[in-house]
């Protein structure tokens, strides 16, 4: 409910219940606006709160959008322990039949050998959203819904081949071929020691 | 690389409010102090109103109880 703008008071004005209630109502009006305007990620979007603002990104490039299609990593990257990697939008990766991400050169992320030697002692911890698209769409949109929770970290195990899953998401198989489809990830993650 | 222009600064001039202290005779609140509270609240309202998200290209916004849900418009 819109509350009227507060008027200044003159010297000698009595501090009445009405005046206090008007101040309270106007404060609650501002608080309600802030609640209404809190940004929430919908379809195909990623919202990342920061102390100095809120970053809003597409999960994929959109024609005419402000986020051009760019590779997140232009070269192969060997993951450094505890370093945070940002995937601001449309980081494309391929999943295998179990929904795992093969860490080959297509993904440009490489698990260090010392991790592959002791995979149970390490994990990949990520936060963000997943998104997938099918070449032969089963629905009008032809897309799987985004998956994940921007406010909750998920920890993914790593196997001896250097593969890990971007969260316990289902694989994204094409309904016609049964083969996994590429998926996208937006968020951030780190290689951690358990 | 080109950068987006900075948004205009908010016009609020209010200062952070000081807490009041109790005295043996009670609490005296001047009209100036009440007006500083009013100024501060009006600036807060202005800031809140400026936070309203406005949809740009290929963006839809639905206002819900949980907040403003942003959706990408896909072809």
Image: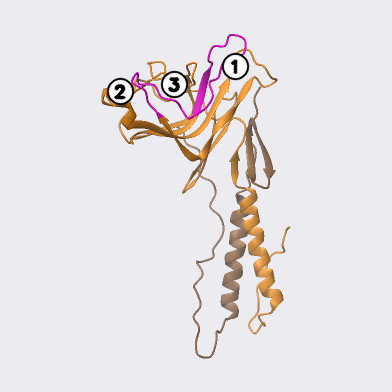
Chain colours: A orange, B brown
Image quarter for residue A124?
top left
| Residue B56 visible at all | no
Please state the extent of the stretch shown in magenta in the rendering: A157-185
Q: How far apart in space, not on screen, are marks 1 and 3 (Cα)?
A: 17 Å
Q: Is A163 one of the magenta-colored residues? A: yes
Q: How far apart in space, not on screen, are marks 2 and 1 (Cα)?
A: 32 Å
At which x and y percent is residue B24? Answer: 50, 90
| Residue A166 visible at all | yes
Residue density around tag 1, few if under 14, some if 14–19, many if 20 or more, within 10 Å? many
Residue at image coords 53%, 52%:
B9
Q: Secondary structure at mark 1?
A: loop
Check residue A101 in the rendering and tell me which mark sits there, or answer none. 3
At which x and y percent is residue A122? Answer: 33, 31
Q: Chain of mark 2?
A: A
At which x and y percent is residue A25? Answer: 68, 65
Mark 3 or mark 2, which is nearer the start of the sequence?
3
């Amino acid at each position: 409910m819109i509350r009227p703008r507060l008027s200044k008071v003159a010297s000698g004005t009595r501090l009445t219940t009405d005046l206090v209630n008007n101040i309270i109502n106007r404060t609650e009006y501002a608080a309600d606006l802030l609640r209404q305007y809190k940004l929430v990620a919908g379809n195909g979007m990623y919202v990342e709160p920061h102390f100095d603002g809120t970053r809003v990104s597409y999960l994929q490039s959109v024609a005419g959008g402000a986020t051009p299609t760019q590779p997140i990593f232009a070269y192969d990257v060997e993951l450094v322990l505890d370093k945070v990697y940002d995937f601001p939008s449309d980081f494309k990766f391929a999943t295998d039949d179990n929904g795992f991400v093969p860490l080959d050169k297509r993904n440009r992320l490489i698990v260090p050998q010392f991790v592959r030697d002791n995979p149970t002692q390490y994990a990949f911890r990520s936060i963000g959203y997943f998104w997938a698209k099918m070449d032969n769409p089963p629905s009008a949109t032809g897309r799987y819904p985004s998956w994940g929770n921007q406010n909750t970290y998920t920890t993914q195990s790593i196997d001896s081949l250097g593969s890990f899953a971007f969260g316990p998401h289902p694989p994204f198989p094409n309904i016609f071929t049964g083969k996994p489809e590429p998926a996208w990830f937006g968020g951030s993650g780190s290689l951690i020691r358990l | 690389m080109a950068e987006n222009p900075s948004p205009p600064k908010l016009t609020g001039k209010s200062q952070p409010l000081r807490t009041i202290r109790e005295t043996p005779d009670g609490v005296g609140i001047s009209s100036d102090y009440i007006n500083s509270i009013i100024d501060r609240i009006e600036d807060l309202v202005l800031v809140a109103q400026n936070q309203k998200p406005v949809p740009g290209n290929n963006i839809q916004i639905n206002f819900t109880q949980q907040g403003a849900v942003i959706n990408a418009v896909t072809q």
